[in-house]
Amino acid sequence: MHDLTGVPLVDVHCHPFTRKERLSADEFINVTAFGGGSPQYLEEAGAAVDESALAFLRAAKTDTVYFRHMIHRLAAYFGVPPDVEAVAAARNAAIARDGYEAYCKAMFTAGDIATLIVDFGYPLPSIPVETFRREAGVEIVPIFRIEPLIVDLLKADLTWGEFRRRYDDTIADALTHGGYRGLKSIIAYRTGLDISPLSRTPDQGLDAHDAIRRGADSGAGGGAIKRLRDHLFCRALELCIDHDVPMQVHTGMGDWQVRLTACQPSLLLDLLRFPAYRACRVLLVHTGYPYHAEAGYMANVLPNIWCDLSEGLPFAGGAAKRIIAEVLEMAPVSRVCYGSDAYGTPEPFYAAAVQGKHAIAAALGGLVDDGMLSQGEAQTAARLIAGENARVLYRL
């Protein structure tokens, strides 16, 4: 497969980052590493967090293949030894020399990152879209996460009629006047993806909301809160159809809080093939990794389903080529999008872009070697996955 250098990337799933002009090595690890736990995680369980525990947590973060690959890519970018202290010092020096905005722009340019489709629901409090757009220096396409809105409305102790009106009006305003180009849900973190199409009925929302207000069954993992979240998820799909925008749905792995046994993409099959929702364009975030074969199948048999390669890229490290190849066992190449799930600082975006292009080229090159695709077909597929599919999906 040919080199994909110069092919523009549209990162279909990522998060904004706050301005960080100077980071120690430990701070850099904490804002770029995936997993590994935190002192707060241990403290909440009553465990002592001494120097030994901190060293243990640090190793858990830095000993992943993902993190080490990122350090190697950044070391090559800066021309320094491949260790975290040297990389952190080099990035601090570059920002001090060039300025923060210029540094971000140079890193995104080096990674051929043209557009970021950004979930502004994390981190909280939300970073203003215009602030991130100015600092990132590339095209920013914001999407609206529904869960923070649900939390705020529950805190307000509203009647069901007012709750429903504010929910609809806030989303409609975000999509119509706020510049947001789609919605996002992390219901997989809350109550799982096993959502009945019958949850769309107004009576379910009313009954569930009433039970929560009365304190009559509001357990975090089920009962009234699940019925309410399921109903509001269905309503979000309807609003996406009304406004002709996509819905991103977190599927598969995430951080330690995700309900991993309830996040398989296949749990959404009954809902997404229900006639009322067939017109909604749905992006299965993370392709459900490690259940990514399910997502690829769903993108094959349901015409408005798309797969996002983030999480496998970059956090699964050396598995990226295999994951892409397995998604493409069933998914049309026109329904697969590059994504990074990057956050924290610009550096993971760059490292994910380098790894992503290599993995896409390697997976498609393997199909050429096996006689499954021609060289020309593989080159076309690479451009589709890198960015053109996302532009179609989001009408960019």
Image (spheres, helix red, strand yellow):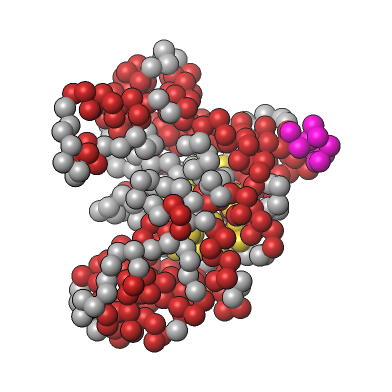
> Toward the viewer: 12 or 34?
34
Q: Position of residue 228 (x, y in %)?
A: 36, 74
- Left or right: 364 in relation to 19: right
Seen as rendered, the residue at the extreme top is 81
Measuring 49% from the left and 43% from the top, which residue is drawn there?
Answer: 311
Residue 330's place in the image compared with 67, above or below, is below
Q: Position of residue 63 (x, y in %)?
A: 40, 25
* Magenta span contains residue 146: no
On the rendered image, what quadrant is the C terminus found in? Answer: bottom right
Residue 347 in view in this figure: yes
What's the magenta region? 366-375
**Image quarter for residue 216?**
bottom left
Residue 336's place in the image compared with 205, above or below, is above
**Image quarter for residue 134?**
top left
> Toward the viewer: 268 or 101?
268
Q: Position of residue 127 (x, y in %)?
A: 30, 51
- Left or right: 395 in relation to 260: right
Residue 88's place in the image compared with 380, above or below, is above
Measuring 34% from the left and 64% from the top, which residue is drawn there?
Answer: 221
* Magenta span contains residue 374: yes
Measuring 44% from the left and 19% from the top, which residue is drawn there?
Answer: 75
Measuring 71% from the left and 37% from the top, which residue is drawn there?
Answer: 364
**Image quarter for residue 148?**
bottom left
Residue 239 in view in this figure: no
> Toward the viewer: 68 or 37?
37
